[in-house]
Image (tube, rainbow, N blue to C red):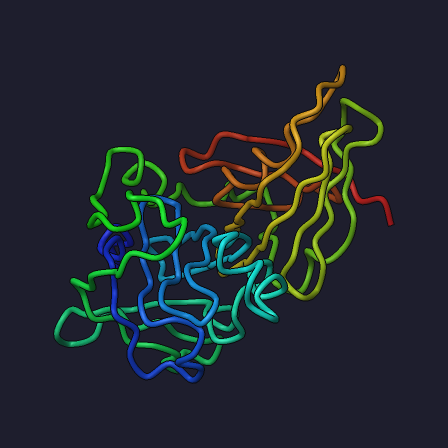
Amino acid sequence: MPLAPERLIDSWTLVDVADPGAGTILRLADSELHLIGSHCGTVGGNWRANSEGVFLADVWSASSAVVEGTPGCEKASRETPGWLRSVTAYRFDGTGLPLLLDRRRQPVARLIPGATPTPEPDMDASVLAPPVVTDEARRNLAPAVALPAALVPFDQRQPAGRWAPTSGHRAAYLEFTADGEWHGSDGCNDQSGRWITAAGGTLLATTRAATLAFCADSVPIGQWVTTARRAGLDGKVLVLLDTQGKETGRLSPTN
């Protein structure tokens, strides 16, 4: 039975986390994520989930006031905590509460709703407000159309490698690395994030802050990969498709 990933939108108290020092509250709002209560203050990033139980999170920012004055926090602000990085799935328990799971479908954390963050230096006021499910969130989390039968699902064993768009700026590229990171360029701006694949050609990817330099013939690599919900191979060509099954981009292998 399909899950309802929009039910993950809330401020959650984290329970049974292997590294309690990494934070006590996980706030999930639309595509934004905040991990609150660690010794480094609040760190932020984004997350993805789908109705098939796949989950992906990425941390890449933090409060400058805390980071600059606390040893080790500059690095922590750019890295997803190990426990959260290990999460690849979710499900709801018998009481309806979410469990975050690892690749073996073993619980990594339990989520208890209704957490109330404590204000911290540089914390945006919006982080203190309870998240709400918006129309945009429903669109982002809607079930994806199945991968077309003509495409071979792009599964976890295949993605690592470098790909180039079939047209556009010659410097544009997309690279998937074996540690779950992706890197790319639209031809002028470097981009990056995390990725995960699952059955049926599922592909979910997060994105981080990027520069905004203009160049002719740029290719929206970051938009292609982050709006993709399915990915398949048409021969050797990688085809990315959005929730409605519309192609967002085509790329050819370069190695």
Examine the rendered structure and indicate whether residue 210 appears above or below residue 31: above
Residue at 75% in and 18% down: 215
Q: Position of residue 169 (x, y in %)?
A: 79, 24
Residue at 58% in and 52% down: 153
Q: Nearer the viewer, residue 33 or 247?
A: 33
Q: Is residue 120 left or right of residue 181?
A: left
Q: Nearer the viewer, residue 124 or 133?
A: 124
Q: Position of residue 201 (x, y in %)?
A: 53, 52
Residue at 20% in and 64% down: 115
- Give the residue furthest to the right: 255
Q: Is residue 64 left or right of residue 95?
A: right
Instruction: Judge whether residue 98 can be spotted in this image.
Output: yes
Examine the rendered structure and indicate whether residue 203 appears above or below residue 158: above
Q: Quadrant for residue 177, please give it.
A: bottom right
- Give the residue furthest to the front: 69
Residue at 60% in and 50% down: 193
Q: Quadrant for residue 234, please give it.
A: top right
Examine the rendered structure and indicate whether residue 32 appears above or below residue 77: above
Q: How many marks?
A: 0
Q: Is residue 169 left or right of residue 249?
A: right
Q: Quadrant of the N terminus?
A: bottom left
Q: Nearer the viewer, residue 93 or 153?
A: 93
